[in-house]
Image: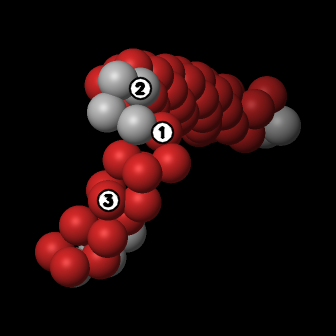
Amino acid sequence: MFNFSMPELIVVLIVALVVFGPAKLPEIGRAFGKSINEFKSATNDVKEETQKTIYLETQEKPADKDHGK
């Protein structure tokens, strides 16, 4: 997803520590993790629904051809 090298990651963590403080970082990390999990769940739901729709549409097309004969 992102290409962070180790020095860049350390700088980002130090800046987050200075801005938010050590007491807020675990809370922010948990909230970020929950957000990522919810986003993944939502995208998986959309993906599954799209696959079901495509499957149903491909199953209906041969039946439509038979009615045309």
Secondary structure type for disc 1: helix
Q: Which residue is mark 3?
A: 14
Residue at horizontal 50 percent and vertical 48 percent from the top: 19
Residue type (three-letter) at the residue carrying disc 3:
Ile
- What is the x, y in percent for residue 45? 52, 22
Up/down of 37 relative to 6, above or below: above
Q: Nearer the viewer, residue 53 or 41?
A: 41
Question: In the image, 26: left or right of 50?
Answer: left
Q: Are marks 2 and 1 in contact (CB under 8 Å)?
A: yes
- What is the x, y in percent for residue 32? 44, 31
Within 10 Å of disc 2 (Cα), the crowding (few <14, some 14-19, many 20+) is: few
Where does the N terminus fall, quadrant-wise?
bottom left
Residue at horizontal 23 percent and vertical 67 percent from the top: 10
Up/down of 13 relative to 37, above or below: below
Residue type (three-letter) at the residue carrying disc 2:
Lys
Where does the C terminus fall, quadrant-wise?
top right
Q: Which residue is mark 1?
A: 20
Within 10 Å of disc 3 (Cα), the crowding (few <14, some 14-19, many 20+) is: few
- What is the x, y in percent for residue 63? 66, 28
Q: Nearer the viewer, residue 10 or 43?
A: 10
Q: Nearer the viewer, residue 9 or 61?
A: 9
Q: CA distance from mark 2 to mark 1?
A: 6 Å
Q: CA distance from mark 3 to mark 1?
A: 10 Å
Q: Which residue is mark 2?
A: 24
- Sequence order check: which comes first, mark 3 or mark 1? 3
Question: For residue 12, which numbered disc appears in the image?
Answer: none
Residue at horizontal 35 percent and vertical 24 percent from the top: 23
Q: CA distance from mark 3 to mark 2?
A: 13 Å
